[in-house]
Image (cartoon, grey):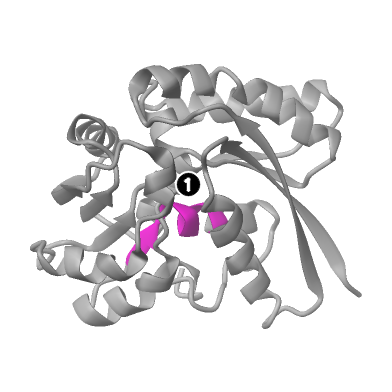
Amino acid sequence: MTKTFRIGQIVPSSNTTMETEIPAMLTARQLIRPEERFTFHSSRMRMKKVVKEELAAMDAESDRCAAELSDARVDVLGYACLVAIMAMGHGYHRISQERLHGRTVENDGEAPVITSAGALVDALKVMKAKRIAVVAPYMKPLTEMVVEYIRNEGYEVSVWRALEIPDNLEVGRHDPAKLPGIVAEMDVSDVDVIVLSACVQMPSLQAVPMIEAMTGKPVVTAAIATTYAMLKSLKLEPIVPGGGALLSGLY
């Protein structure tokens, strides 16, 4: 018997990647789990430039988005902007998830809420990471803030790289074929996990298998971590072909 799951996403208005990479992973999963089907539903928050002021204003719209998606009785909601959460202060993903879940309950459409920020830090725990490398598209001050947020969750960020792309549309246009070269310039010899994209807008999925083969290290992205968390919340095996180590079945 086929079962259909409705995936809701709270998405920055200028994001063009989360609605391609997560559907790509869950569609690939249907190749090994043909009895499952997924549909995808989004609500948008205004944001063009990845700067702290726009991120805070955008986050204030997330309650509306959670209510709208719960109107569709989605089975899980993903908040698809890592840096917006981390810009609000250490540990904010827990506050956001609880508050937005409350909006779904109030609307008689209760659904678990996952933030990409929370999914990433939780994935690092699942992967038993202690030292990590991070690649992010943000300007250096925002990247430093993301690094400090991750460190506050108990991980050592041994090396990080800020690509310094301020425009969110341009982040979505960044060529993932450039990522192996970027990682090759970083000393990842002592890290346990490489966070290839600490951003759900920067395309990275197609580069994950190549970088795992190149470095011999497990690679995760914010989008992969979010997919893992969504599958766990739906009580489904977190396995996706081509989804890197986290979605390989190893964990």
Residue 208: image location, x then y, percent: 37, 71
Q: Name the residue: 57% across, 72% down.
A: 239
Q: Magenta span: helix, strand or loop, mainly?
A: helix
Q: Choose between 33 and 11: the one closer to the eye.
A: 11
Residue 190: image location, x then y, percent: 10, 64
Instruction: Provide the residue span drawn in magenta.
Output: 219-227
Q: Name the residue: 35% across, 65% down.
A: 176
Residue 230 relative to residue 136: left or right: right
Residue 178: image location, x then y, percent: 26, 66
Q: Is residue 107 magenta?
A: no
Q: How many marks?
A: 1
**Quarter of the N terminus within the rendering:** bottom right
User: Can I make out residue 111 in this image?
Assistant: yes
Residue 177: image location, x then y, percent: 32, 70
Q: Choose between 176 and 157: the one closer to the eye.
A: 176
In the image, residue 238 sits, relative to residue 74, either above or below, namely below
Q: Is residue 225 magenta?
A: yes
Q: Which residue is mark 1?
A: 119
Q: Choose between 160 and 251: the one closer to the eye.
A: 160
Residue 97 relative to residue 65: left or right: left
Residue 127 relative to residue 234: left or right: left
Q: Return the residue found at the far right.
A: 1
Callout 1 environment at 10 Å: few (<14), some (14 to 19), or many (20+)?
many
Q: Choose between 191 and 178: the one closer to the eye.
A: 178
Q: Name the residue: 71% across, 76% down.
A: 30
**SS label for mark 1:** helix
In the image, residue 167 sits, relative to residue 237, either above or below, namely above
Amino acid type, residue under disc 1 in the picture? Ala
Q: Quadrant of residue 117?
A: top left
Q: Name the residue: 26% across, 62% down.
A: 193
User: Can I make out residue 89 in this image?
Assistant: no
